[in-house]
Image: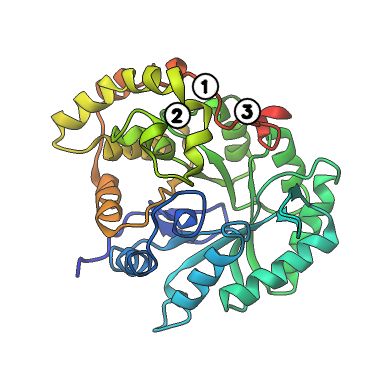
Amino acid sequence: MSTPKTNTLKLGDDGPEVFAQGLGCMGMSAFYAGAEHNESVATLERALELGVTLFDTSDVYGPHTNEELLGAFLAEGGRRERVTLATKFAINVTPEGEREIRGDAAYVKRAAEASLRRLRTDVIDLYYMHRRDVRVPIEETVGAMAELVREGKVRHLGLSEVTGKELHAAAAVHPIAAVQSEWSLFTRDIEDGVVPATREVGAALVAYSPLGRGFLTGAWASADTLPEGDFRRFQPRFTGDNAAANAAILAPLRAIAEAHDATPAQVALAWVQSRTAAWDLSVVPIPGTTKRHRLEENVRAVDLVLTEAELAALEPIAGQVTGARYPDMTATFNDRD
């Protein structure tokens, strides 16, 4: 068993301290093909051994099955006390299988109660609004979340895919510990408004998809090689001419990885981690994986420090990416910024 690492960052001015890299658990239950239950559980256990403390899920992953997986895992052996448990609400799947965004106060309360049951816990450490319901004032949504804090059912609040203006409005209602946004060498649009606002309100930035949904690993260059059922087969950056063009811009990433005897994934994660110093802001990437050896590879990136020259060589990548993040961007902050 490896000795847990001591690298930690604080989530918000008054939030918990967590290991400098978290674990995105989504792929263990949803969207990515090929997850295997026993290996996923073993990966969760290995994460604890390596000192990873922030476990990230959502009620929509599955839906519901990812929370159930984590709930069963954390219920045993005192594991719950070792984890900062983050989950999310707002993306509701109707009985007809349609997705809708809900942020009304009654829904927030109902969603939290259901997540608590599935997670087998009395309190959620970090509760995110997963997406903004534009029909509801953000003050109403965050007000309902704040009531959960007062009731002792939630410890800290977070927001995902919000604009800087929305973040300031939310923080005026209740302190926000973390903003979860996509941030990687592939995706840097949050730097214009969201990142400065995050720093201004005293929150941390939790970076999801820090490996560009796997593209930055350099393992493949076409969605055609992905298994059936993998949602990336329909993502613009992974299909057709976009995929080939995006693969071609990764040469600097591969060269730096070779110089460090590291993998492209490790260099990509080291870049995200370097944003903490670059922005004077706690930045915690949450790469997702379902396999222990990939988890171990990712965690080793915490100790990888890139030089100024290497950071400069990586700088142009995001500006050369072809294709949007999602086929439909209407649920992201970009649609409202």
Q: Are dots 1 and 2 in contact, CB under 8 Å?
A: yes
Mark number displayed over residue 323? 1
Q: Residue sitting at 31 percent across and 33 percent down? A: 220
Q: Which residue is mark 3?
A: 193
Q: Nearer the viewer, residue 233 or 20?
A: 233
Question: Mark 1, mark 3: which one is toward the viewer?
Answer: 1
First in sequence: mark 1 or mark 3?
3
Mark 2: few/some/many CA within 10 Å (<14, 14-19, 20+): many
Q: Which residue is mark 2?
A: 238
Q: Position of residue 129 (x, y in %)?
A: 68, 52
Q: Quadrant of residue 305?
A: top left
Separation (CA) of disc 1 from disc 2: 8 Å
Q: Quadrant of residue 61?
A: bottom right
Mark number displayed over residue 115? none
Q: Would residue 249 be found to the left or right of residue 204 on screen? A: left
Q: Nearer the viewer, residue 261 or 65?
A: 65
Q: Would residue 191 be found to the left or right of residue 332 on screen? A: left
Identify the element where label 2 is drawn: helix
Identify the element where label 1 is drawn: loop
Question: Mark 1, mark 2: which one is toward the viewer?
Answer: 2
Separation (CA) of disc 3 from disc 2: 27 Å
Q: Is residue 256 above or below residue 144?
A: above
